[in-house]
Amino acid sequence: MKLVPQLSLARLKSGLFWRTFLLLGTLTTVSMISWIGMISVIQREPQAQQISAQIISVVTITHAALTHSAPELRRELLFDLVSNEGIRIFSLEEDDRVDPPPDNYLMPDIEALVKAKLGRDTRFSARVNGVAGFWVSFKIDDDAYWLMLDRERLRGLTGFQWLGWASLVSLLSLIGAAIISSLINLPLSRLTVAARAIAQGKQPAPLPEKGPIEIIEANRSFNQMVDDLKQVESDRAVILAGISHDLRTPLARMQLEVEMANLSDEARDGIQSDIGQMDDIIGQFLDYAKPTEASSFTDVDLGGLLADMARETMRLPDVKITTAIAEDAHVMGNPTDLRRVLNNLIENARRYGKTPGGDFTEIDISCQLKGSGAARRVIIDVQDHGTGVPSEKIEQMLKPFTRLDTARGQANGAGLGLAIVERVLLRHGAELQVRNRAGGGLAFQISLPAA
């Protein structure tokens, strides 16, 4: 169970940015397709009329020129047409190999318009006798001729050209959609990062109060909330510290009076035990209220610290500890707070992890280094061999002032030990996992960035 709030990059990418980008991209694509269809429909008739008029004009002028020119000048006229106008005239023979007209969506309209002017027997072809061009037939008296025009003179935008332009416009539109989505989601991303910092116990920088009125109001409210939380945290620390300090004075006086009172040894031991328990509870309040500042972090030999604490605990007669601690397990942190965390976990295992039916506690402690480079982490495991806790109550264990008496035996204290652990680890950028051990008992795992 991962108890540290995390916002993975994959989850971020599957969120509002990509949703906005896909919606804008879909809208742009649909609009582009609709625009191309509309332009094609609107442009089809004028373009067909323009090309038809050009064909009719060329054929009519060529027909008139050949008809009214002297026979001895026709060869020179044909040469001029080829040289200057790109027009060629060939005799139409019965054995000509004639291919179908060009495969163009405008061709049916062009054929209808040209035949209406030049006659129903006008023929069209894309290739005659293997020569490519735009071929149109016409007659002079009883002789039939082919007039060949260069395709470039009649070619509009082809399908590939339409696709190319549409692809370019779509690409630019998608880039624009990505930029717009980023601008829309930038304030939300800042808010997400700031909220994650709050969840990790850090103090985020104030969000900029500029932009649309909705963003201004949201950022202003968040900044006010951060200030209020900071004030609440400060007030709580002051109140808890004040109460704890004020309580310790009468406790010290009570301890002195018990020492001087005429009591039996049994009564004196009972009262001193109660006073000691109250003093421990006050200490927990102070530890919970104490903030952990990142400015106090130093290089901590966590392996060495853990080994020292394990040796101290092994001196107790009812504890059996097994250790597997790696060397050079260094982290950046507050050594006092990290010692308190490890002490709380080991003490929790010692108190509530007694072997079922036995009078001693068996604790397994390990410290390992995993990963490499910037991703290198120190992994600490503290496991006991007790009865564990119900799975549905594991998260509840880490809440302040919670004592699972029925699951972990008769608990003493204010129920702040594990809450202090989680609070300190959050401020160290660490992750805490709690689970029931496969062979019985409870297992705590801490993962901290290696120094």
Image (cartoon, rainbow, N blue to C red):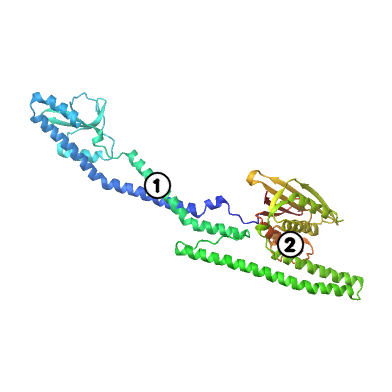
Label 1–label 2 contact, CB within 8 A: no
Three-letter code for the amino acid on which mark 1 is drawn = Leu
Residue 384: image quadrant is bottom right
Label 1 Cα crowd, 10 Å radius (few <14 / some 14-19 / many 20+): few
The disc at residue 172 is 1
* Residue 196 point in image, percent of width and height: 59, 58
For this rendering, which residue is in front, 177 or 275? 275
> Which residue lies under the disc numbered 2?
417
Three-letter code for the amino acid on which mark 2 is drawn = Gly
Residue 229: image quadrant is bottom right
* Residue 276 point in image, percent of width and height: 82, 68
Q: Is residue 186 left or right of residue 412?
A: left
Find numbered disc 1 in the image and state the secondary structure of the residue it sits on. Answer: helix
The disc at residue 413 is none
Q: Is residue 170 left or right of residue 443?
A: left
Using the numbered discs, state the Cα–Cα distance from disc 1 to disc 2 in whole angstroms: 58 Å
Residue 146 visible at all: no
